Image (cartoon, grey):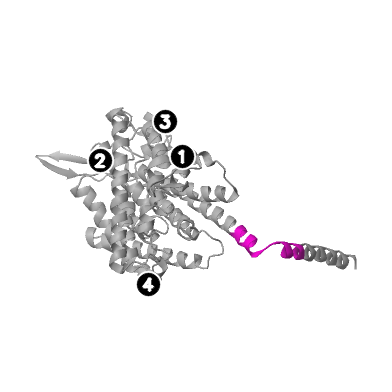
Amino acid sequence: MRKRLFLFAVLSAVLGVGSIFAQELTMADVSAAFDMIWLVVAAALVFFMQAGFAMVETGLTRAKNAGNIIMKNLMDFSVGAIAYWAVGWALMYGESSGGFIGTSQFFLAGAESATYRDWFFQVVFAATAATIVSGAMAERTKFSGYLLYSVFISGIIYPISGHWIWNGGWLSNLGFHDFAGSTVVHSVGAWAAMVGAILLGARRGKYVKVNGKVTVKAIPGHNMPLAALGVFILWFGWYGFNAGSTLSGTDSDIAFVATTTTLAAGAGAIAAMFTSWIWFKKPDPSFSLNGALAGLVGITAGTWVISPGMSIVVGLIAGVIVVLSVEFFDKVLHIDDPVGAISVHGICGVWGTLAVGLFGDLEKIGSGLTRGGQIGVQALGIVAVFAWTVVTALILFGILKAAKVLRVDEKEEMQGLDISEHGSESYSGFQIFSNM
């Protein structure tokens, strides 16, 4: 009897408190609470992608540089977060000056709870743009130079072009659509990576000139399972990246976006596997893994406006493109990109942005443009962001190179950056790598 009375009292208290909240809370309050929870959780998922990038880059490079890769992925977020708090957020989401740049809220001045929520969601996107560069410039970059670069891309380069598209800037006003960042995030990181890799030069022994002919040497990564783990982590985090970009915990399209994201990633992995199978006579693991990432990057711009069926098409084409692009940059242009970051994030980012115009639902896009007009605006945005990023990255990396803080010397590179840059070994006591 006492137990029954106790349970009755507890139930009455709970129901009483519940009725009070039901009377005092409005639907707007409930919606705001869901938005707060959803965006913070989604941001945490995107933050976890830093671990994914670290694992992919570590696995696809040599063991003697593993600790250096980890340090770069740790520090580009750490210094980038502070730079984005101090300057980046204001340039991206402050009061617009002519649709080109933000001019207020430096150091989050005057921030309210919703601003902190939005800043947290956006800072992890800034970190993604910055960390893309790490892979393309791996195994020969000075750590001090990389730290300086991370400050500028998170604080200046990424936020300004992001303002044009995501804060009612001039590209947004023209009708440019990039739902979650194929161009805003991925292409910015990739184009900066491309400039950095060109100015940095290839790894020692990568391109060997014999009798006037350049021979391309493969430099295999040391841990494919680690790279695979990184891709699965990135895929997992991408649900925060894309579905989180609905920006509302009560948006009924969250599941739709998650569906198109999944289908494009799967299609990308399949297409890359078969393309590598045809190209190299064997289904290549690294290309298949990059195919999944290519599909994810490809669908990111149009994940809300492209149907599930067409998202498979976007992923399939991205999977083919990434294999051909990696080969082109390596064998034809001789740009040394150890992890294929330029192809995955840059070339597939371009494809995904154009796919919005080709396959997107014009009514959902809401630009009022015709199909041809939408394609044209998407192309204009691609060119504008490419030009901005290449010019600013060229200035930045040019200064770092002139100051001799961009590339390690030959001895340090041969020794490995773990020892030469950090004075430690990631696999102490294990002789599992060679100098070349």
- In the image, what residue occupies the spot 42% across and 59% down? 179
By secondary structure, the bulk of the magenta-drawn segment is best described as helix
Q: Residue furthest right?
A: 1
**Screen quadrant of the C terminus:** top left
Mark 3 and mark 4 lie on one chain; the one further toward the N terminus is 4
Asked whether disc 2 touches disc 4, contact meaning CB atoms under 8 Å apart, the reply is no
Q: Secondary structure at mark 3?
A: helix
Mark 4 secondary-structure assignment: helix
Say above or below: 159 vs 20.
Answer: above
Q: Mark 4 belongs to which amino acid?
A: Gly
Give the amino acid type for the residue marked by disc 1 in the picture: Val
Numbered tag placed on residue 87 in the rendering: 1
305 is higher (above) or lower (below) than 128: below
For the residues marked 2 and 4, what is the alpha-carbon distance in whole angstroms? 38 Å
The label nearer to you, 3 versus 2, is: 2
Q: Say which residue label 3 marks.
A: 422
Q: Which mark is residue 309?
A: 4
Q: x%, y% of residue 140?
A: 31, 36
Q: Amino acid at mark 2?
A: Ile
Tell me where residue 89 appears, x and y as whole percent.
47, 44
Kindly identify the amino acid type of the residue bearing the numbered disc 3. Answer: His
